[in-house]
Amino acid sequence: MSRSLLFIPGNNPSMIQNSDLYGADAVIFDLEDSVLMEHKDAARDLVKTYLEQLNLLNCQVIVRINGMKTPFLKMDLEALSYDYVDAFMIPNATHGAIEYITNQIKELEQTRQLKKEIQLIPIIETPYALLQVKEIVKMDRVIGVLFGAEDYTTNMSIKRTKQGEEILFARNMISIAAKAYNKEAYDTPFTDVNDIDGLKEDVKLAKQLGFSGKAAIHPRQIDMINELFSPSQEDILFAQRILKQAKKETKGAFSIDGKMIDTPIITRAQKIIIQAKLYGLLGEPND
Amino acid sequence: MIKKHFTTTEAYKVETYHKIEPVYSVIQDKLVFNINQVLDQLKLKDNMTISFHHHLRNGDAVLNKIIEHLDNRNLINITLAASSLFPVHEPIIKAIKKGTISKIVTSYLNGPVAKAVSQGMLKDQIIMQTHGGRARSIETGEMVIDVAFIALSCADKNGNGNGKYGNNAFGPVGYSIADMMYAKQVVVVTDHLVDDVFYPEIEAKYVDYVLKVDSIGDQAAIVSGTTQITKDPIGIKIAKNTTKILDLLGLIKPGFSMQTGAGGVSLAVASEVYQIMKERNIKGSFISGGITGYFVKMLEEDKMDQLYDVQCFDLEAVRSYRENKNHIGMSASKYANPFDSPVVNNLDFTILGATEIDVDYNVNVTTDSFGYILGGSGGHADSAYGAKVTIITTQLMKSRMPIIKDRVTTITTPGDSVDILVTERGISINPKRVDLINQLKDKIKLSTIQELQETCYRITGRPVKIEHGDKVIGIIEYRDGSIIDYLYKK
């Protein structure tokens, strides 16, 4: 469960070298859009070498590979299907593409006797994929989906705005589909890296729509995303009170501070505490 | 005079301090409009020592002009005692090559002159002092200045003046106060003559000549290097961790004092500290050293009582120095001379940078890892000694070069004065500061400096040791005048 997923260009050694320092819950090493055609080989080698040699990352390791229609997909999969990769992010996802890629990875995993299964995070960035999102998200290895609003709006021939009214329906559809199958929904990046106030509003909206995290294209976006996707101290304290009281209660419903507490509220409190633990918000020693 | 070698940072405490007598002017008619005329009257000779301040930083035009004339007069073996030298001073390389300048005494130099000196172009040696050490050496007569050329943005015909007014105002004249009092002859160089100067920092009683020129330089070029808060996420991470340490140590409290450099990370620390001050309604007592617009903001928003300014780093600081009575100028001696109960001794903490730091916490800000001069102590060693807590902030590697060495290429500041190292991959505390370790060990993850070094080596590999040549081209003086290290020809 990642709050923030930071894109790191696969051909940028200084950013790769520091990729574990930015505080993102997940790092996405990008071999696709941020890498020019003539640098694809170098980027693949660089990311592979970094992951093999240094093993510094204490976060989810994701690699955005090149898509089905490129000659690079197979090389990306062959080079990087190893235990040090947690998930591949798949651009221009379709149900067929995910099926094909899953089979390719399975073969490599078996041949190489990997210890774990590599997960998939398809990017929903075409109208066609949006219509297929329910089918895509319920696939076996898919742990969540990322909304790619830039390509989506281009494909829809609509103008992208900071307010995002034009992508509201797509966002709703993606988050609902993901939640329906108990998967993660990751929101599209906010592209103005200098507008931290705009980012704040965008993250609040994404959280309100049911997304579990958001992609970032610059390290300076990470703190804000992490903060807003984390439960507040007030929420944590209230959740702790609910769970403490629930242990004592024999009835299905009870009240705290005049508010009715029943099963859905207790479940939400449990989720808040799980998140708080995961993100180190329960007062444990930190660095 | 044979110089002693550095022993400890406290060695000065057992020495007696004897100031020489100030030198007063007996000249009545001081105003001169022609540079050759003033140079004739000074009776300049070979082997003299002439001094300059660096308040105009990379905008200074006075030093180059004077050296050009000395060169034209075929003088030789001049010692150039400039408080700092910048890239703008490149033209003096000609005088170095010719032998007009044979020796340099300074606290900081970078740019082409630094490269030329590193390559062994000086006939004699370079002596690198701290800002406090320079004032000390002049006051004691250890460094005798024959002629001090003091650029002022505003002066009267008698030599009263300051850097507050005029088109090229630059702020306080702190680095020239000792030169003014103890040089055998003093020349004020100004491009803005006024009838009266009401609050002179340079006083007529010490001044022999006032040279009126068209321009002393370019005020806009005072801002050299970064004086903006860093936007680099790694720099910000280091700054946040530094601030966290300051907070955990209880150093951000009412009446606290601090000094930081003007670099992006230092200013980011100041910015983080300032946020805490606002949130908790804390007012500090003073900020000292080089002053930037950010510190001015803290003063004007009533979050600091005073700024003790030895040099302005930007024009906002210059404006504030002119207008705000709580923005106070100080001499380099009052700032950092170990024998003058300096302001740095009252600092609660200082945040400093490093080009290299070694496993004994010695810091180098004088040369790069190849031995080329790229800076100098300035007030680094002074404030590191004086402050109760000295924090070095640096990235663990720059490009592919590890910053933590087994031994720094050049010692600028001894490890005894350095307490905490904050990097992007961890924090270490000098084992000698057991008190700080005990205060922090349960609250924040600490590493040994060797562990940080190993972490770095995992990424960069272990670097090959770079050997220096045999020829000594200069010495690094600690603030008490002892030799703490040598510079070698590249």
Image (spheres, rainbow, N blue to C red):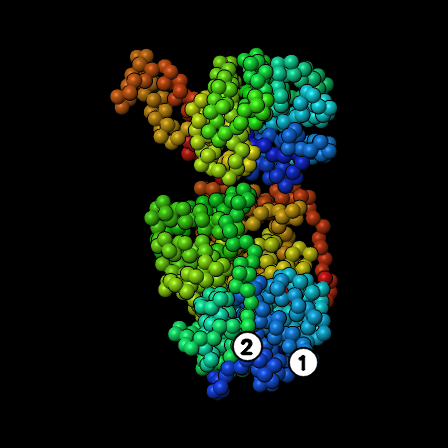
Nearest the camera: B391 or B216? Answer: B216
Residue under label 2:
B148
Q: Residue drawn at (71%, 34%), measured in percent from left and top?
A: A39
Nearest the camera: B207 or B441? Answer: B207
Q: Where is residue A259 in the image (x, y as percent from the top left)?
A: 29, 20
Q: Is mark 2 in CB contact (under 8 Å) with mark 1?
A: no
Residue B309 sits above or below residue A16 on the image = below
Q: Residue drawn at (36%, 18%), measured in percent from left and top?
A: A265
Q: Which of marks 2 and 1 is nearer the N terminus?
A: 1
Q: Position of residue B153 (x, y in %)?
A: 49, 70
Q: Residue drawn at (43%, 55%), measured in percent from left and top?
A: B295
Residue A283 sits above or below residue B203 on the image = above
Residue under label 1:
B73
Q: Residue drawn at (36%, 53%), measured in percent from left and top?
A: B301
Taking the image as shown, residue B256 lies to the left or right of residue B398, namely left
Residue B456 sits above or below residue A191 on the image = below
Q: Is residue A128 visible?
A: yes
Query: Residue lying farthest left?
Result: A258
Disc 1 crowd rating (10 Å Cα; few below 14, some 14-19, many 20+) is some
Amino acid type of disc 1? Arg
Taking the image as shown, residue B203 lies to the left or right of residue B63, namely left
Residue B404 sits above or below residue B94 on the image = above
